[in-house]
Amino acid sequence: MEFKDLDPILHNELRLKVMAALDSLDDADFVYLRELTKATAGNLSVQLSRLAEAGYIKISSSGAGRSSHTVCRITAKGTAALRDYQNAWMSYFNTK
């Protein structure tokens, strides 16, 4: 039996929720992701930054201050990482 390593970037509940949501959408704005994940704005912001630093999502913002609009989109690298994570996670259950 061999367990595959789980990606530490994706092995976080909030980051995984964001990636799962973005995987099924063209893009999503910050407010939608905050409401969907029930995260605080501060925590979501930090986790989005971590995903962007890993190259898993692209964040674009327009406007400034209270009128800013932030949109996130999954990257090809992010999609591949999510698929690898899913396969690695399943290796924990397919042990026969």
Image (tube, grey):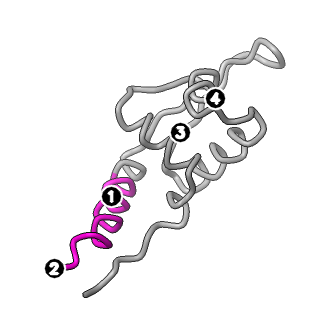
Q: Which is more N-terminal, label 1 or label 2?
A: 1
- Residue sitting farthest toward the left: 96
Measure the alpha-carbon separation of dots 4 and 3. 17 Å
Side of 69 relative to 51 (left or right): right
Mark 4 element type = helix
Q: Is residue 41 left or right of residue 56?
A: right
Q: In terms of sequence position, does the residue under pointer 4 or pointer 1 come before the other?
A: 4
Rendered image: mark on residue 96: 2
The residue that disc 3 covers is 58
Query: Are the two marked residues, 4 and 3, in contact with CB atoms closer than 8 angstroms?
Result: no
Which type of secondary structure does the marked residue at label 3 adopt?
strand
Q: Earlier in the sequence, mark 4 or mark 3?
A: 4
Label 1 Cα crowd, 10 Å radius (few <14 / some 14-19 / many 20+): some
Assign the C terminus to one quadrant of the image: bottom left
At label 2, which amino acid type do we have? Lys
Residue 74 drawn at (x, y percent): 44, 39
Q: Earlier in the sequence, mark 3 or mark 1?
A: 3
Q: Tell me which corner region of the image, top left, top right, bottom left or bottom right, holds residue 59.
A: top right
Q: Is residue 47 above or below residue 72?
A: below
Whole-percent x and y of residue 66?
A: 82, 15
Amino acid of disc 1: Gln
Point out residue 1 in the picture as x, y percentages from the top left corner: 25, 87
Separation (CA) of disc 2 from disc 1:
18 Å
Residue depicted at 77% across the width and 12% down the height = 67
Residue tagged 4: 34
N-term-proximal mark, 2 vs 4: 4
Please report the bounds of the magenta region as a residue range. 80-96
| Residue type of the residue flagged with mark 4 | Arg
Q: Note whether 50 is above or below 96 in the view shown.
A: above
Q: At x 74% / y 32%, what residue is drawn?
A: 41
Q: Which residue is painted at 56% across and 51% down in the image?
A: 13
